Amino acid sequence: MAFLSRRVGIFASFFLLISGMLLAQDWKTATTLPGVDLSGLTVKQKAVALKVLRESACSCGCSRTMAQCRVEDPSCSFSVGLAATVVQAIKDGKTPEKALEEANSSRWGASHQNQVLEAAVKVPVAGSPVTGPADAAVTIIEFSDFQCPYCTLAVPEIAALLKVYPKQIKLIFKQFPLEIHSDAYRAATAAIAAQKQGKFWEMHDALFAHHENLSLDSILKIAQDLKLDLPRMQKDMESKEIHETIDKDLQDGNNAGVEGTPTIFINGQRYNGRIELASLRNIISAELKKGGNQETASR
């Protein structure tokens, strides 16, 4: 797993820097929140929605409000789902009380607060890049976006987990470039093009290391440094095959309930906790005690 772990130190330092920036944001007055789409709301509706999010508790058990959780724990899928439900209800003209009621009765509501792992689903993985032993007891499927800062923060945590369990875990990567990230789709085509030349994970590391500059020139410089065949890579990046691969990954993610990045599935079970080594170790240990892979990654 050297190709995944070699940049752990760099990513760890970056994690501390970005975490400090996120925590510095005042969630009590912020007019935008990570992962919350407020488009389509009137000025008045936006103010109402933000008030609900700032004053209402998240159901993940963190003792924060929804808005606070979005700022301080951007990997929390509960706050994403709750916020989306509140925003849609306000957009539909419902009262703040009704919007909160709908959020609390949704799949992300208080009754699900201890559901760190959801029911297993089948996620197609044929052709997806994989690292780790073929017979690993635990399969982690990651839907990720190379331009997403939260995905960047998850990289060293997952790399550290693979280092702790080198024989028990395999990691499968699925592309999920978000529309809000203008360069994410291009980066996804580059990663798959590199995969065709046998260097997906090297490109994976480099794209995340340069996630703030994923212009075509930057990507081609990375490819040159990795000694890839540049004419072939550029041709592949524009090919119908690669675009269809990304579209298929996006559809697989939508079918599995992926709402943002990073999202990981552990033996087919969507994981709703923090993507950090300490939390993940507890989950992996429990999975290993259960007997490992439940055949939920379909080929």
Image: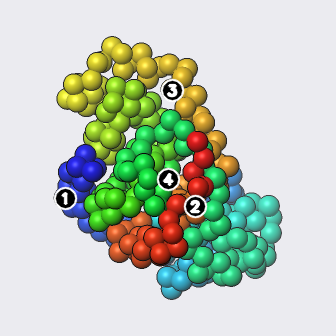
Would you identify the image quadrant in which residue 150 lies?
bottom left
Query: SS at mark 2?
Result: loop
Q: In the image, is residue 115 above or below residue 90?
A: below
Query: SS at mark 3?
Result: helix
Sequence-wise first label, 3 or 4: 4
Spatial CA distance of label 3 from label 4 is 19 Å
Label 4 crowd bin: few (<14), some (14–19), many (20+), radius 10 Å: many
Q: Nearer the viewer, mark 3 or mark 4?
A: 4
Tally of numbered tags: 4
Query: SS at mark 1?
Result: helix
Spatial CA distance of label 2 from label 3 is 29 Å
Q: Amino acid at mark 1?
A: Gly
Quadrant into which the C terminus falls? top right
Q: 6 or 153: which is nearer to us?
A: 6
Residue on which the image places disc 1: 9
Q: Amino acid at mark 4?
A: Ile
Residue on which the image places disc 3: 242
Q: Amino acid at mark 2?
A: Gln
Q: Amino acid at mark 3?
A: Ile
Q: Nearer the viewer, mark 4 or mark 2?
A: 2
Spatial CA distance of label 3 from label 1 is 32 Å
Q: Residue at x 28, y 39 (%)?
A: 202
Q: 112 or 73: which is nearer to us?
A: 112
Q: Looking at the picture, how far across and down is residue 241, in whole percent?
A: 54, 23
Residue on which the image places disc 2: 294
Residue on which the image places disc 4: 141
Query: SS at mark 4?
Result: strand
Horizontally, residue 211 falls left or right of residue 77, namely: left
Sequence-wise first label, 2 or 3: 3
Q: In the image, is residue 192 above or below residue 233?
A: below
Residue 256 appears in view = yes
Q: Residue at x 35, y 36 (%)?
A: 200
